[in-house]
Amino acid sequence: MYRQLACTAMCAAAAMTANAAGISDGAVKIGVLTDMSSIFSDIGGKGSVVAAQMAVDDFGGQVLGSPVKVISADHQNKTDVAATVAREWFDNQQVDMVQDLLPSSVALAVSNLAKEKHKIAIASGAGTTKLSNEACSPYTIQYSYDTYALTTSLVKAMARAGDNSWYFLTVDYALGASLKSDSAAALNAAGGKVLGESKHPMHAADLSSILLQAQASHAKVIGLANAGADTVNAIKTAREFGINAPGKQKIAGLQMFISDVHSLGLKSAQGMMLTTPFYWDRDDASRAWSQRFFAKTGRMPTFIQAGVYSSTMHYLKAVQASGTDASDAVLAQMRKTPVNDFFATHGVIRADGLMVHDMYIAEVKSPEQSKKPWDYYAIRQTISAQDAYAPLGAGHCPLGAGKVAAGQ
């Protein structure tokens, strides 16, 4: 009997040691690198940190007998700052996975560094299609969306309805170029025309002159290939000028967030069409999680913040299933495990690092149609994952052929 008890105790201790041995440095550490003080702070920012911590807490705070820790930093929308922080995290703070990474310029820089260090980068906040094309990496997952999925179905639907001439206002960095390029390709494929484009810097103080150029083009649609405060500023200015009054030019927000609509108010945003991977009031599961997020933040989540939770949970489940936090093993497990949760439906992480899933075309409600706080969207159409994203191998990523091992 004593021998049996001793064996039981020793076996249990050995099992715990074996599990702990799978975790480097005795802990799993997640770094949330985001904009906490500038134009994207509402769509990621502190809300992304809250979302990551919610996932860790819901998982139980530990994995394979080791604690899971979340740290965060504000990259100030500076690529060099982001790269410096990420390098410090990887080299000296034993961070295993870095998360959020909005905007696209930051994601591209950190993705390269993560590849060099053999660490996992989950770009929940970045949209540029470069991440799954020429800049793809076996260590980067683009989780929430890309600009192709946000723009293509929406532009084609509007063009079919007769809104087939567009003028673009494009923010002058990677995201803007990707939004405009994908939109223009979809418009041309639908038989429409691009009548012009004006570029502006990030966080532009005054968009009046380029909006007047867009108005003078007589395009049926002014496409906003920007994000965050730049999008809000453009829509407010267009309203002031009467550019998008009923019967005049339409404004299409090519990357719109619920936080943008909240800032604008329904009176200014009503009638706008947009594509989104997530809406808090879509079903019981999305409502339940979003109400928990609201209780912590006082705001409903953006699709980036919801994506941070979902991808963090998917990562932790992969660590648990693979028995280690070693990057290659965890990534292999993440790729072979489908994603079906409150955020994503029919989600699959492809060989090029893109997590494809269903998308939704939504219309912003009028003040009269809204029945409760944050009741902003009417979902008009579901776009299947297969139709929402560009086909695997259509771009320039060598991983698209299925070579996902490090160094291939």
Image (cartoon, helix red, strand yellow):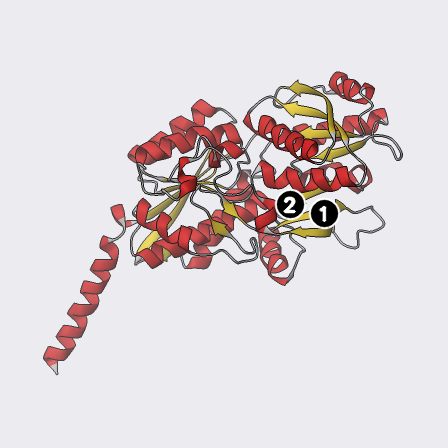
Position of residue 357 measured from the top left corner of the image (x, y, whole percent)? 55, 50
Residue at the farthest left position: 3
Quadrant in the rendering for residue 95: top left
Position of residue 302 measured from the top left corner of the image (x, y, whole percent)? 61, 44
Label 2 crowd bin: few (<14), some (14–19), many (20+), radius 10 Å: many
Q: Is residue 375 visible?
A: yes
Secondary structure under tag 2 reads: strand
Position of residue 189 measured from the top left corner of the image (x, y, whole percent)? 67, 34
What's the amino acid at mark 2?
A: Thr
Q: Which mark is residue 208?
A: none
In the picture of the structure, the residue carrying the numbered disc 1 is: 362
Secondary structure under tag 1 reads: strand
33 lies above or below 370: above
233 lies above or below 299: above
At 44% from the left and 53% from the top, the residue drawn is 314
In the picture of the structure, the residue carrying the numbered disc 2 is: 276
At 43% from the left and 58% from the top, the residue drawn is 59
Position of residue 129 measured from the top left corner of the image (x, y, whole percent)? 53, 34
Closer to the camera in the image, 4 or 161: 161
What's the amino acid at mark 1?
A: Ala
Residue 96 located left or right of residue 184:
left
Quadrant in the rendering for residue 351: top left
